[in-house]
Image: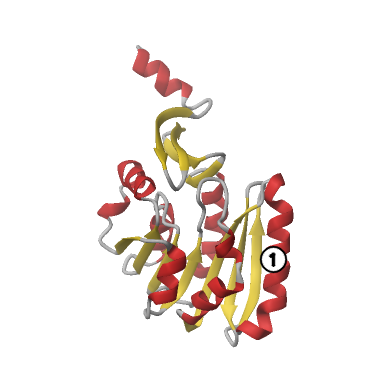
Amino acid sequence: MLLFFQNFLQYLFPQLIETQNSKFSGNISVYKFRNKYILKAGQVHQSGGWADALFKRVIFKFQISNFKLKQILILGLAGGTLVELFTKINPNVKITGVDIDPVMVNLGNKYFHVLKRENLKVIIDDAYLFVKKTENKFDLVFVDTFQGDSMPKKFTEKELLKNVIRMTDDKGYIIINRLYLPKFKKETDEYYQNLDSWQKEMNFKIKDYYQNIGNKVILLAKQGKI
C-alpha cells in the first residue's frame, strides 16, 4: 500500500528519491515525477525537467536540416540526457562527454543508464583544461558547464570560446547553455552581448537562441556556415 501511495504521489508532484553531496556540485538530488527522473544540483535541473524541453527545441533544428551529426562533444555531461536526445537523431553518432564530477556521472548512470551507451566516451576532467589540450575535432560542441547552480567564470571568458571554436569543424556548430533564472538573467544577457561583439573577431555567427524561465540556449555556427 505504501509503494502504491508513493507511486500515486509522484504523478502529482516530484518525489525525492536520493541525495548525495559532491565537492564540485554541492548537494545533488534525484526526484521522480510522472515516471521520469530529474537530477538537480541546488535549484538547477542538471538532467530531466525544464532544461530537456528546451534542448529538444534546439536539437530539432538538426533533425530538419541536412546537417549530419557524426562527432559531438558535450562539456558538462551531468546525467547524460543530451546523449539520448542526440542519439535519437543519429544512432551512429559518436559522443564524447566531459565532466569534472564523478558523483554526478555515477548518478546519471544509475538513473539514466548513460554509461551503458556504446556510442559514448566519458572523460572525468575539468572541461576548461580539456579543451585547451585536445587536438580532436567535432562537428558539434555543446557547452553545459555548471557546478551546482552556477557557471564558473572561466567558462564565460573569451579564451574558453577560442578553444571551443578551434576544436569545432569548419562547418560545425556550438551550443551554449546558460541559466536564465531571475538572479542570473542580467549576467546571461551580458554574456550574450559579449558573444555578439566577438562574432567577427572569432569567426562565428549567432544563428539563434531559445529561452524559457530557467535557461537560455545559444546556437553558434562557424563563419561561412549559413
Q: Is residue 172 visible?
A: yes
x, y percent for residue 190: 73, 62
Residue under the image location 55 percent in, 64 percent down: 155
Extreme top residue here?
A: 1
Relative side of 113 to 148, left or right: left
Q: Where does residue 173 sit, x and y in percent of width and height?
A: 52, 75
How crowded is the residue under tag 1: few (<14 C-alpha within 10 Å), some, or many (20+)?
Answer: some
| Residue toward you, 10 or 39 | 39
What percent of the width, then of the height, locates residue 31?
Answer: 45, 33
Question: Which color mode does the image show?
Answer: secondary structure
- What residue do we see at 54% from left, 67% from top? 175
User: Is residue 65 something that shows in the picture?
Assistant: no
Q: Locate the N terminus and report the quarter of the image it occupies.
A: top left
Element type where label 1 sits in the image: helix
| Left or right side of 152 for 206 | right
Q: Is residue 175 left or right of residue 6?
A: right
Amino acid on which the number 1 mark rests in the picture: Tyr
Image coordinates of residue 162 in percent, x first then y, are 55, 78
Q: How many marks?
A: 1
- Reading the image, the residue beneath label 1 is 192
| Residue located 55% across and 49% down the image | 51
**223 shown above or below 51:** below
Give the quarter of the figure containing the C terminus.
bottom right
Q: Nearer the viewer, residue 94 or 179?
A: 179
The answer to whether residue 103 is above or below residue 163 is above
Is residue 102 or residue 44 the one in the foreground?
A: 102
